[in-house]
Image: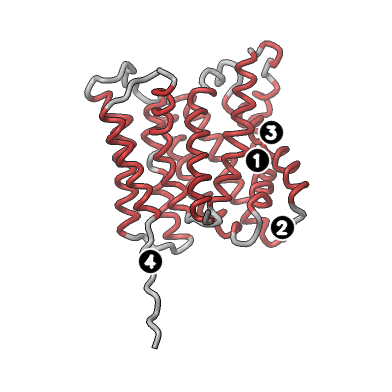
Amino acid sequence: MSSVLKAHLALFVVGIFYAINYIVAKGIMPTYIGPSGFIFYRVFGATILFWIVHRFISKEKIKREDYPRFIQAALFGVAMNQLFFFNGLNLTSPINASVIMTSNPVLVLLASAVILKERITPFKIAGISLGLIGSLMLIVLPVILGLSQIEWKSGNPLGDGMILINALSYGVYLVTVKPLMAKYEAMTVIKWVFTFGCVMVFPFGYDQALAVDWSAMPTDVLFGVAYVIICVTFLVYFLNVYAMKSLSPSIVSAYIYLQPVLAGSMSIFLGMEKLHWIKVLSAALIFSGVYLVSFRKSKKLPTEA
């Protein structure tokens, strides 16, 4: 199996983890843990896991001159990304958040062009456009046609703004961390990104973290918290940086379009929803979009004299 295929497989697994998260993490926040407190436990829990695993598989150290880039990656990829998303989601509606998050690949493409000088090809533009259409169709069209039982709730301007900042910060993070991946091992990069992220998250989540009553928390909620820390934080971030060893930030971000499809597929499997032509068509558009974003023209081999 090629490294590129392994990277795509890793991103697909990330999408599955996120899809499960929509079901598992439901009801945890803010009933049992406040949004900033939840981030506190996510970041500190994942950081401990990164340090333990790194100790057994690598002895690589980072150079002092790379500290500023690691701090920048931690600011945009851990602190701003997670704090703005969870607090924004706590204020606005899930539908609004889902629609705004589909802007992430576009922001990544623009950031890659400005910071990494990555060429914006017609295939990438077409792929991101297809993915955007597919995601919006899956989220908005059932409501417009009256097919969904969920009412279209008006969002909160502050919450919507936080979600947009989250999408932008994650886009900057993917572009920022790419050069580090060319210099260090994936586990080394993510370990130090989260270590610096801990320092940034601490003052915002400390009070809510202390207010959690763990003794009153049901067993299924405890398992949900563990799942978010281990799978949705530790494994997801590692698999994302692992994929970036072989793929561009634009391709990695394009996989965000798969999350609504995978979440819907899981709901159908569990009997929570029924298969509909809108879901089939949106899935086809999204998969086509991911393919176009990752498409590269094959280079012609020089002819022998």
**Nearer the observer, disc 3 or disc 1?**
3
**Nearer the observer, disc 2 or disc 1?**
2
- Local packing at callout 4 (Cα closer than 10 Å; few below 14, some 14-19, many 20+) is few
Q: Provide the secondary structure element on which disc 2 rests.
A: loop
- Local packing at callout 2 (Cα closer than 10 Å; few below 14, some 14-19, many 20+) is some
Considering depth in this image, is 65 or 282 the residue closer to the camera? 282
Q: Earlier in the sequence, mark 2 or mark 1?
A: 2
Q: Amino acid at mark 4?
A: Ser
The residue that mark 4 highlights is 298
| Dot label at residue 45 | 3
Q: CA distance from mark 3 to mark 4?
A: 43 Å
The residue that mark 2 highlights is 62
User: How many numbered discs sit on the rendered protein?
Assistant: 4
- Local packing at callout 3 (Cα closer than 10 Å; few below 14, some 14-19, many 20+) is some
What is the quadrant of the C terminus in the image? bottom left
**Nearer the observer, disc 3 or disc 4?**
4
**Nearer the observer, disc 4 or disc 1?**
4
Left or right: where 137 falls relative to 54:
left
- Local packing at callout 1 (Cα closer than 10 Å; few below 14, some 14-19, many 20+) is some
